[in-house]
Image: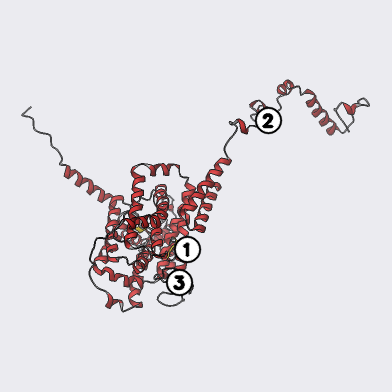
Amino acid sequence: MSGDSPEPTTPLLHHHIDGWRHRLATSLRLKTTLFSELSGAVGDLGTYIPIVLALTLVSHLDLSTTLIFTAFYNIATGVLFGTPMPVQPMKSIAAVAVSETPHLTVSQIAAAGISTAAVLFFLGVTGLMSILYRFLPLPVVRGVQLSQAIINVMEVGNYGLAFAFSAIKYIRYNQDFTKTTATKTTDPRPWLGLDGLVLALVCLLFLILATGDGSGNESDAHLVLTTRRRRVQRRLRILSSVPSALIVFLLGLILCFIRDPTIFSDIKLGPSRFHVLKITWDDFKVGFVRGAVPQIPLSVLNSVIACRFDELGRLLVWGHASVPWGGRAGGQYRFGGRSGLSVVFLGLGKLVLGLLFGNSFVRILSSFPVGILGVLLLFAGIELAMASRDMNSKEESFVMLVCAAVSLTGSSAALGFGCGIVLYLVLKLREMDFSGFPFFRTKSEPTAEDESLINPNEDSGLHLNIDYWMSRNSYLYLLDIVSNTTCYVSNTVLDMPSDSSDTGLCKM
């Protein structure tokens, strides 16, 4: 045995390196074009910028730290999951932080994010999240998802999510994100100007022409195309390859400096100084009650369960020194992002901006045309709402719409979820068969013997089981039916005794 050569072994480190190399190659592989991934990278900035800007101006958020940390998170999600899953602020926590008085401090905001992450972590490691996914009705989940797509949470001072309704308000009215109790939405946006309605409508038209309904050319891939249709498809492929969202976002950045040239003098290069955030036990109590409690149902339903139904990704949540973050794909997928490369591009962009401009970048964001943000936000909200189109029956659509309506009216995903569950159970209770319970059985309830009266298997029609009726002493009743029918058809009077009316055979 000593003369045998030892079997070659692969070092454990090399095995892990090969595994990560394979993961990188898989996650960052282009599924569309490079320009489509770049365009998808900025697809959700219509949600990101208003929330981060409001938190920076109202809650004194460290923008430099936020950009750098979220950049790392973007890169990590792109590599780990290989799907366009954004890292977005937790909307309910952010809304409470800037709209309710007293405002949440940065320490309380971080405590709320850590508390939410701890609850989701517990649900995940114990398997309770899988149980929720298995038993929660899809119409209820879609109802909450639909309400979050069209309700307005991050309209600073209004409790709701910044999606389709917010997008329309961003486009039509002037906004002031420094307001802490109510966003100024009463002044109509002027038609002309560097942040006018004409500019927003032109950007909207450009995005529609470039992206269409967001499905690309996948629906016609299996069809045999004519020459004319091939020309149309070629034009659509060219339009889809245009990084439309990226162009619109870069246009907004350029307009920032044109609208306010003093930005050049206010910019200071370099990141802000990092510091350790001190979180006390009181911060955890306030952050959990005011921030985490309204956020947890929204994260569970809209970011975890809905993502599992859609199979668009998973949930990643962190609480760090600036603001808690979660993620769910919407605008990024809508504008062409199909792989983890799109969020990696976004992370690299945030990292450069955070390291280069630091906190002075808030001067640029504060001058960004809000109408353009509204256009980007509109597409993200519509893409999220379109996930509810998979309802297969009127009953499912009914539950979904009631759940969405309650969530919109009460501005609470938890309230809409509860009403949706109750409605779903009532509808199922209505269809239950209670014949097995003696309490619900009535005397007129047909038995199996009664059901044998009608034989639906005969092609000639419905036939009476004569033997059954004979056994029940109903011969006279049958004779009465036949006699009356004969009298009606022939319209003649049978030869009967004078007292034939008492026989019950035929009476004219």
Could you tell me the amino acid type at mark 1? Phe
Quadrant location of the N terminus?
top left
Q: Earlier in the sequence, mark 3 or mark 1?
A: 1
Residue at the spot 59% in from the left edge and 34% down from the top edge: 434
Task: State the residue position of label 3.
Answer: 184
Cα separation, mark 3 vs mark 1, equals: 15 Å
Could you tell me the amino acid type at mark 2? Lys
Left or right placement of residue 1 versus residue 503 in this view? left
Q: Earlier in the sequence, mark 3 or mark 2?
A: 3
Q: Pinpoint residue 29: horizontal percent, then vertical percent.
A: 29, 52
Q: Residues within 10 Å of mark 2 (few under 14, many from 20)?
A: few
Left or right placement of residue 465 versus residue 10 in this view? right
Of discs 1 and 2, which sits in the foreground? 2
- State which quadrant residue 226 falls in: bottom left
Element under label 3?
A: loop
Q: Pinpoint residue 6: horizontal percent, then vertical percent.
A: 10, 33
Work out whether residue 448 or residue 180 is closer to the camera in this orientation and state it. Answer: 180
Q: Residues within 10 Å of mark 1 (few under 14, many from 20)?
A: many
Reply above or below: 120 against 204. above
Q: Residues within 10 Å of mark 3 (few under 14, many from 20)?
A: some
Cα separation, mark 1 vs mark 2, equals: 56 Å
Work out whether residue 367 or residue 453 is closer to the camera in this orientation and state it. Answer: 367
Task: Find out whether the residues at labels 1 and 2 contact each other: C-beta distance under 8 Å.
Answer: no
Task: State the residue position of label 1.
Answer: 165
Work out whether residue 53 or residue 250 is closer to the camera in this orientation and state it. Answer: 53
Label number found at residue 443: 2
Cα separation, mark 3 vs mark 2, equals: 67 Å
Reply above or below: 468 against 208. above
Residue at the spot 33% in from the left edge and 43% down from the top edge: 125
Work out whether residue 284 or residue 483 is closer to the camera in this orientation and state it. Answer: 284
Element under label 1?
A: helix
Q: Pinpoint residue 48: horizontal percent, then vertical percent.
A: 36, 63
